[in-house]
Amino acid sequence: MSLHLWWLFVATVFVVSAIPGPNMLLVMTHGARHGLERSTATMAGCLTALVIMLSVSAAGLGVFLEAWPRLFDTLRLIGAAYLVWLGVKSWRAKAGAIDVRDETGGAHAFRPFTLFRNGFLVASSNPKAILFAAALLPQFIDASRPVLPQFAVLVSTFAVIEVSWYAVYAGLGARIGDKLKSASVAQAFNRLTGGVFVGFGAMMALVRH
């Protein structure tokens, strides 16, 4: 691909990635609860899921989902239900809970694998990302040149931009982390993030592709 086309891809992904969504909300929440350093596990989980989805879209799964709308709807509803479940858990969490995303509310909340898993599940909960990637990536591929190297450049570029925005959101969360030591503020934070997650899940369930 040409340098001009690559810069166009950079600008597109930069704007799209900046838009707040479930991934960014989770990263910011974990940044507030656990600090910037620990939330890197959450970022890794989100990014791993997105890179996998980009890869399967390149393999043609996006076309497959378009051809089988029932499968797409099933995956979409499962993802929506997971986001709603996260929202309910956050809403009902006690003000002093260690992690609004942890099922047990115990010491495991700080384990990197738990944060990684939560990030991976949230990022992979929306099958529309596969369709989005299937529609976006071909626009920046030069068919007259080898496709695989171009795909590797696009995915690597996407990963760098996405992680940069994760760091911004996690940093914002870390800045408000100290305020969560107040029980009333922590409860308000839990209910706000819980309500937003439920909202994301409802939109995912109701909006058709």
Image (tube, helix red, strand yellow):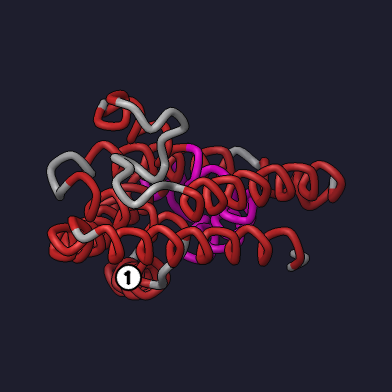
* In this picture, residue 195 sits left or right of residue 2: right
Residue at 66% in and 42% down? 60
76 left or right, relative to 109: right
Up the image or down, 182 lies above or below 146; here it is below
Image coords of residue 119 (percent x, y): 40, 41
Q: Which residue is the site of mark 1?
A: 14
Question: Magenta stretch mostly in which secondary structure?
Answer: helix
Q: Is residue 156 above or below residue 170?
A: above
Q: Magenta stretch: residue 176 in it?
A: no
The quarter of the picture where residue 199 lies is bottom right
Magenta-drawn stretch contains 134: yes
Q: Nearer the viewer, residue 189 or 9?
A: 189
**Percent position (x, y) of residue 181?**
18, 56
Which region of the structure is painted magenta?
121-150
* Quarter that holds the N terminus: bottom left
**Callout 1 amino acid:** Phe
